[in-house]
Image: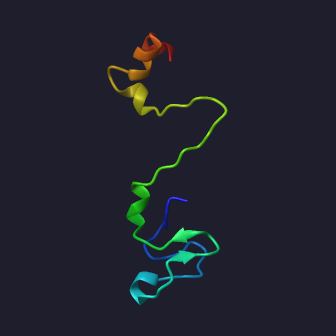
Amino acid sequence: NFGPIESGICACGKHQGIEKKKENIRFCEQLEVEFMDSQIRRYRMVYIKLAWSVTHVWYLKHLPSYVANLLAKPLKEL
């Protein structure tokens, strides 16, 4: 989980406005979400192990293409 969708509000609806109430509840036990600012979702990352390699499209669109250079193929073949 990357964090709350809305600041101080749990998606399950059990806890709302935690930051405004100044309660000591820091975690939703049901969804395992930490109560904090929703902006944290922009910075958290995750690693997912897949059956094959995948790259983000940004690596293909950047000129010169790092992936095309690494594979020694023209960008149109990728």
Is residue 32 shown above or below 19? above
Residue 43: image location, x then y, percent: 39, 54
Q: Position of 49 compared to 25: left or right?
A: right
Q: Residue at x 61, y 74 (%)?
A: 12
Q: Residue at x 46, y 70 (%)?
A: 6
Structure colour scheme: rainbow
Residue 60 appears in which quarter of the rendering?
Answer: top left
Q: Position of 76 compared to 13: left or right?
A: left
Residue 64: image location, x then y, percent: 33, 19
Is residue 42 shown above or below 71? below
Number of marks: 0
* Residue farthest along the right direction in this orientation: 51
Q: Residue at x 44, y 59 (%)?
A: 41
Quadrant that contains the N terminus:
bottom right
Residue 20: image location, x then y, percent: 39, 86
Is residue 53 shown above or below 22? above
Is residue 2 shown above or below 69? below
Q: Position of 68 compared to 32: left or right?
A: left
Residue 40 appears in which quarter of the rendering?
Answer: bottom left
* Residue farthest along the left direction in this orientation: 63
Q: Residue at x 63, y 29 (%)?
A: 52
